[in-house]
Amino acid sequence: MPERGKMVEIQPLAFGEQMDEPRKYFGMTGPQLGILAGLAGALCLILCVSGWLIFGSGLNMARPQSIPSTVVNPTATRILTPTVTPTIAPTAIPYEQLIPQGWVQHRTALMELWLPSGYRKSDTRYPFLSYELTKVDLTLSRAPSDTSLYNVYVIVAYEPLPQDSLNSHLDDRVVEIPDGVRLVERRDVFVNSTPAVRLLFEGKSSDGLDVNALMYVFLDGNTVWYVEYFTQINEFYQLLEVFEKSIATFRLSK
């Protein structure tokens, strides 16, 4: 030991002389390399686990799932063919209830028909069809009055049925209507449960007057019956409701 009170001289290190230091690899000490290796191993482990999770799930997702096959057994389907619904005739109203109060009966040996008062027998010819009927059973007319400027005519006639059906017969008759007369309506109807054909004509009378005619055609066995109402066109539509009520009272004598 140096003596007390005597300074100790510290000699500096000569050039090239070094202190003892830990050995380094790639600029790092051994402990540092160990820490780095541990981190690298942990990183590799994390990457491996992540890759397995990603690619393993992807394979499972890409793998087609087995879908249970369903066998559909064909069943017989019942096909319903459309059925033709026949036209049902309306229930007949008692005849007496069809006659409006105050109307007058017009009767022959073959038929009867009711009309308002004021109609009288006349000899008017059939105006709208050019053929000669076998028989005119009844001809009525109503003269002009204070409320009506024109004559009104009602004709009931009949003839044998020369065709197989009523409609075929009417097809031929309609072709024979005179020039200037036009059929504007033709339809099958029921008159108080009795089948009939309703015809509506328009044209001109022999004196050039614009007239309309409402005709009902009935088939009784092999006999065709015609009931026609006609007058000037304006008068016609004013009386159309009366004509429709009157035809409901037409019936053949039994």
Image: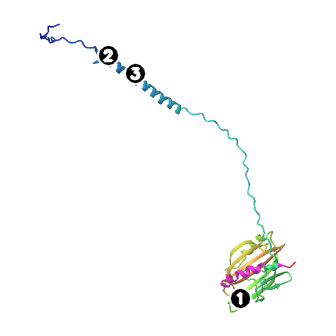
Above or below — where is 21 with respect to 177? above
Tell which circle, 1 or 3, labels the residue nearer the N-terminal end: 3
Magenta includes 240? yes
Magenta includes 20? no
Q: Amino acid at mark 1?
A: Asn
In front of the other: label 1 or label 2?
A: 2
- Indicate the colouring scheme: rainbow
| Secondary structure under the numbered disc 2 in the rendered image | helix
Give the image quarter of residue 159.
bottom right
What secondary structure do most residues of the magenta stretch adopt? Answer: helix
Residue drawn at the location 41% of the way across and 23% of the way down: 44
Q: Which residue is mark 3?
A: 41
| Secondary structure under the numbered disc 1 in the rendered image | loop
Q: Which residue is mark 2?
A: 30
* Segment colored magenta: 234-252
- Residue 108: x %, y % from top left: 84, 84
Above or below — where is 223 with respect to 124? above
Q: Is residue 31 left or right of residue 123?
A: left
Label 1, label 2: how far apart the Cα atoms are: 139 Å
Q: Which residue is mark 1?
A: 151
Q: Is residue 205 left or right of residue 46?
A: right
Q: Amino acid at mark 3?
A: Gly
Look at the image and tell me whether residue 60 can be seen.
yes
